[in-house]
Image (cartoon, grey):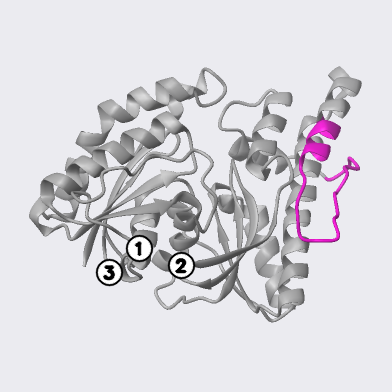
Amino acid sequence: MICLGIESSCDETSVAIIKDGREVLANVVSTQIPIHKKFGGVVPEIASRKHLTNIAFVVKEALDNANIDFKDIDYIGVTYGPGLIGALLVGVAYAKSLAYALNVPIVPTHHIEGHIAANYLTYKELKPPFMALVVSGGHSHLIYVKDYTDFEILGKTRDDAVGEAFDKVARVLGLPYPGGPEVSKLAKEGKHTYDLPKTKFENFDFSFSGIKTAVINIAHKEGDNLRREDLACSFEDTVTDELVENCMKAMKKYNINRVVLAGGVSANLVLREKLLKASKERKYECFLPDLKYCTDNAAMIASAAHFNYISGKYYDIKEKLDLNAVANLKIGE
């Protein structure tokens, strides 16, 4: 079964061709980072307009790379939430039109389920159940993946997502967008010398607004005396510790012995090393997605769409035209 996947939830226009949910025939990503860099973050209206101008060309490139034609597509998977509403609408509208024209089913797909499914592309043998530590610019979740389409949220951030905290800390330290990689780059030059707060709850939730505020206060207080590289290192070390410790605690509580990392922040090398080390110490299996599948891409969406499709979670667009984008879509909905 051949799926054409479309991802446009933020500032990447991506189209992929996936066979049977795990074999990548093509994965094209058109990034807008150079455009938004001068603004210090994603401008939603600009992102939406760029998706409009890019999407048809990206679809053609994906088909050419896979060496197939429209007639070879069996179904279409598309991100319909969560994300920037304008950006999502471009992908959803294009997917609906294409599904209607080709007379193939459409599979609305959750963006975070896509990030989890990125691991199926890296590890062909991977099957649920497992724990998923989902870390991105908009999400910090601990999710018990019971089956390919069955998810239970065990913990989540109560305020800032970890990726959002990275971006805000980068801004305070005078680093360019996107902030996460820049903070990590600077942190390599420093040492963990600043004492920053960790938040602990009785359950498995996260909170990163406190450490973000602490970084801001230290930066303002120290002024020209600030050791930027040490503060970056202290921040990265503290938040990655909190993520891994909470994950290990939840896995022990729920007797889960396999963990996967997912989301844009899963590209963070410090986090990858710590999660792998903690898992080995406890004799857990740990799965880390290929770096090319960590950031937003359509291959992960097409993979997730495959498992939705074989579970019957799809429909004929000619019979149901009301598919819409949902900016704050909850996982499992």
Tag count: 3
Q: Quadrant of residue 72?
A: bottom left
- The residue at which mark 3 appears reads as 20
The quadrant the N terminus occupies is: bottom left
State the image coordinates of residue 78 (x, y, percent, origin top left).
Answer: 33, 48
Q: Overall secondary structure of the magenta stretch?
A: loop
Q: Secondary structure at mark 3?
A: loop
**Residue at 86 percent of width and 19 percent of height:** 223
Q: Are marks 1 and 2 in contact (CB under 8 Å)?
A: yes
Answer with the quarter of the image where residue 197 lies. Answer: top right
Which residue reaches farthest front? 319
Rendered residue at 39%/53% (across/down)? 109
Q: Which residue is mark 2?
A: 149
Q: Secondary structure at mark 1?
A: loop
The numbered mark at residue 313 is 1
Q: Which residues are magenta?
A: 192-215
Q: Is residue 194 magenta?
A: yes
From this view, report whether residue 263 is shown above or below residue 222.
below
- Residue 147 appears left or right of 72: right
**N-term-proximal mark, 3 vs 1:** 3
Label 1 CA crowd tier, 10 Å (few <14, some 14–19, many 20+): some
Give the CA separation, mark 3 to mark 2.
16 Å
